[in-house]
Amino acid sequence: MPAMFLESDRLWFRAPEKSDVPFLTSALLDPRVRRHLLVGRYPFSEAGEEVWIERHAQPPAVDGVTDVVMVFGLKGGDQPLGSTGLHRISMLHRHAEWGIFIGRPEEWGKGYGREVARTTLRYGFDTLNLHRIQLRVIADNERGIKAYRSAGFKDEGRQREASYVDGKYVDLLLMAVLRHEWRKAAGVGQPSR
């Protein structure tokens, strides 16, 4: 099993490494995976993914970097299953935007998205001291929306025809969870001072 930064019941989490490049590139080239990503409209290359990993290898406090990105996989194995991250972290306003993809479609529908959401929220609220974590999701991504709501995200709005997917404009849903809402829903007490 790889060295872990975080773990959940079934998953390990760690920083992306160069050895993850073939998986990440392959996953992002799969039209089933990239259809629900807001960044998946251009071809990905292994060279580009290496540059992306290098750029995200620095902690957020260094040189104004504002993203924390991790790959995750099943415990007992060393192959990544997907990637998750908190992006555009604002240490002033204490918020970030969350993103996730599960790069192996045969693993969809097994509750991993919900597990990743809960683990990432715990990290964002308890370790990074964030107050709010938000996301944007294509409105027809029913599986993702169900997982996000289950993890505590609340609907905040809709951006009509805000994204172009498969030859048509589609709505984006805006969702967020606040730390006190997450604590209550997760049954987590207030941190000691």
Image (spheres, rainbow, N blue to C red):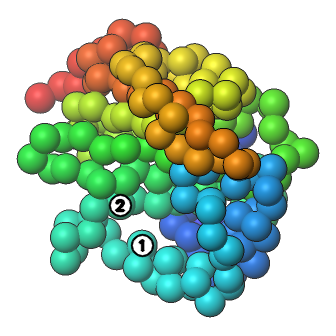
Marks 2 and 1: in contact by CB < 8 Å? yes
Question: 165 or 78, which lies in front?
Answer: 165
Question: 74 or 164, which lies in front?
Answer: 164
Q: Earlier in the sequence, mark 1 or mark 2?
A: 1
Q: Which residue is mark 2?
A: 67
Asked whether residue 9 appears in the rendered view, the answer is no
Question: Taking 23 as reference, is 157 left or right?
Answer: left
State the mark number for residue 47. Answer: none
> Which residue is pictured at 80% across the width and 61% down the height?
30
Give the image location of residue 168, x and y in percent. 66, 42
Q: Which image quarter is the C terminus in?
A: top left
State the mark number for residue 56. Answer: 1
At label 1, counting other C-alpha atoms closer than 10 Å, the crowd grade (few under 14, some 14-19, many 20 or more) is some
How far, Cα to Cα, is label 1 from label 2?
7 Å
Give the image location of residue 101, x and y in percent. 64, 49
- The three-letter amino acid code for the residue at tag 1 is His
